[in-house]
Image (cartoon, rainbow, N blue to C red):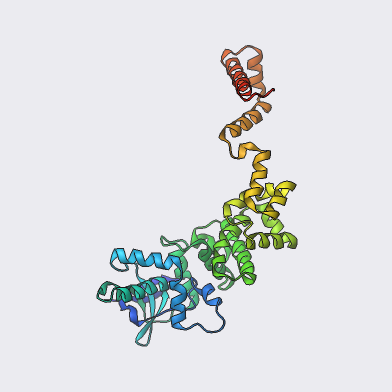
């Protein structure tokens, strides 16, 4: 195949499109998707260990099933020539999936080779970081939220990309970039003391936390709150990013906070619901909103009632009767 050119940071870099033998591919322990997994092992990680780390991920097993159904890989990986072998700069998961498929189906040639963009020149780490951002942060094949945040953090902290560059290049708002950086920083700090690989999934909780200004300020400014928040996560008191939306109200309610400390979010949320049934009842949500509207009824509507607007009076009477009927059915005296 004739060489093509790709422009990265204003530089035109040649590459060739082709296929490479999966057996000739070497996994890249520096790839941003797997650096955290590598970090869980002390010292160097062998090629076999790296393969095992990736294959243990449910997402890679799911990917292998997709490749099996498609009879091979469609999207090209990125490799760099390394003598007679190829260093996989992007596409380690696809490579591992094909390795295991070729073991399971040794007579199927569809898993023995993989399409690739083949570079015969050195790609700097910064060039690769920018290329991967194009593909997996702003591109159509996106990494999960934690991996995207890590990549944004690398571009900002390691390669010195400005907020303006990140915003323009990744097509993200500056506020979104700041959220990702704060959430990644908070997750990294948590993982330092709670390094189980499964805890990476708690990035979503930290991300939601950083989206709420009042919680973000407490987390970053009050060591005791940060300590408690880490403990709630570690003890599974909080285990879903959606739960963060109710956390300000829980913190402001003494009984709800006690329930969170004792048993967790579910019981804390129950306390909030008891105090405010509109949280889980559409009917009482409507009643609460109608009450708020009536308390702030515009003077023009009140004047219409005073002068005898018939339709508005009928609506007020119907509301009164409906409330009285509900009270009668429930045996409640208003």
- Nearer to me, 271 or 66: 271
Query: In percent of the image, x 64 and y 21: which residue is there?
Result: 300
The image shows residue 117, relative to residue 331, as above or below, that is below
Residue 39 placement (x, y as % from top left)? 55, 76
Q: Which residue lies furthest to the bottom in this view?
A: 83
- Nearer to me, 16 or 75: 75
**Image quarter of the N terminus:** bottom left
Q: In this view, does 77 lie to the left or right of 170?
A: left
Query: In percent of the image, x 67 and y 22: which residue is there?
Result: 299
Question: Is residue 145 at least partly visible in the picture?
Answer: yes
- Nearer to me, 174 or 274: 274
The image shows residue 212, relative to residue 59, as above or below, that is above
The image shows residue 45, relative to residue 60, as above or below, that is below
Question: Is residue 253 at least partly visible in the picture?
Answer: no
Query: In percent of the image, x 51 and y 66: which residue is there?
Result: 147
Residue 195 placement (x, y as % from top left)? 59, 71
Q: In this view, does 278 lie to the left or right of 221?
A: left
Q: Which residue lies furthest to the front in this view?
A: 331
**Image quarter of the C terminus:** top right
The image shows residue 302, relative to residue 42, as above or below, that is above
Q: How many labels does the image show?
A: 0
Q: In which quadrant of the rendered view does residue 17 lie? A: bottom left
Query: In percent of the image, x 57 and y 81: which residue is there?
Result: 42
Residue 112 placement (x, y as % from top left)? 29, 76
Residue 115 placement (x, y as % from top left)? 31, 72
Q: Is residue 248 left or right of residue 315?
A: right
């Amino acid at each position: 195949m004739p060489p093509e050119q790709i422009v990265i940071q204003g530089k035109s870099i040649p590459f060739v499109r082709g296929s490479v033998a999966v057996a000739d591919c070497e996994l890249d322990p520096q790839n941003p998707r797997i650096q955290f997994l590598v970090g869980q092992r002390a010292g160097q990680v062998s090629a076999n260990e790296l393969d095992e780390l990736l294959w243990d991920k449910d997402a890679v097993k799911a990917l292998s099933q997709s490749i099996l159904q498609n009879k091979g890989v469609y999207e090209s990986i990125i490799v760099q020539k390394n003598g007679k072998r190829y260093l996989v700069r992007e596409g380690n998961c696809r490579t591992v999936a094909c390795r295991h498929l070729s073991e399971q189906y040794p007579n199927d040639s569809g898993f023995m080779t993989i399409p690739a963009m083949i570079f015969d020149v050195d790609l700097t780490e910064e060039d690769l970081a920018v290329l991967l951002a194009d593909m997996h942060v702003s591109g159509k094949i996106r990494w999960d939220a934690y991996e995207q945040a890590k990549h944004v953090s690398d571009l900002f902290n390691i390669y010195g990309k400005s907020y303006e560059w990140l915003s323009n290049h990744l097509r993200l708002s500056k506020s979104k970039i700041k959220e990702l950086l704060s959430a990644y920083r908070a997750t990294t700090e948590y993982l330092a003391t709670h390094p189980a690989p499964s805890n990476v999934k708690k990035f979503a909780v930290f991300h939601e936390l950083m989206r709420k200004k009042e919680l973000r300020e407490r987390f970053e400014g009050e060591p005791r709150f940060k300590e408690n928040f880490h403990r709630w996560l570690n003890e599974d008191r909080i285990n879903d990013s959606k739960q963060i939306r109710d956390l300000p109200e829980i913190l402001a309610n003494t009984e709800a906070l006690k329930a969170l400390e004792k048993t967790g979010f579910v019981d804390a949320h129950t306390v909030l619901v008891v105090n405010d049934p509109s949280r889980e009842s559409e009917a009482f949500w409507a009643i609460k909103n109608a009450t708020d509207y009536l308390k702030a009824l515009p003077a023009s509507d009140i004047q219409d009632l005073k002068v005898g607007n018939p339709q508005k009076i009928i609506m007020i009477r119907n509301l009164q009767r409906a409330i009285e009927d509900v009270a009668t059915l429930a045996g409640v005296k208003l």
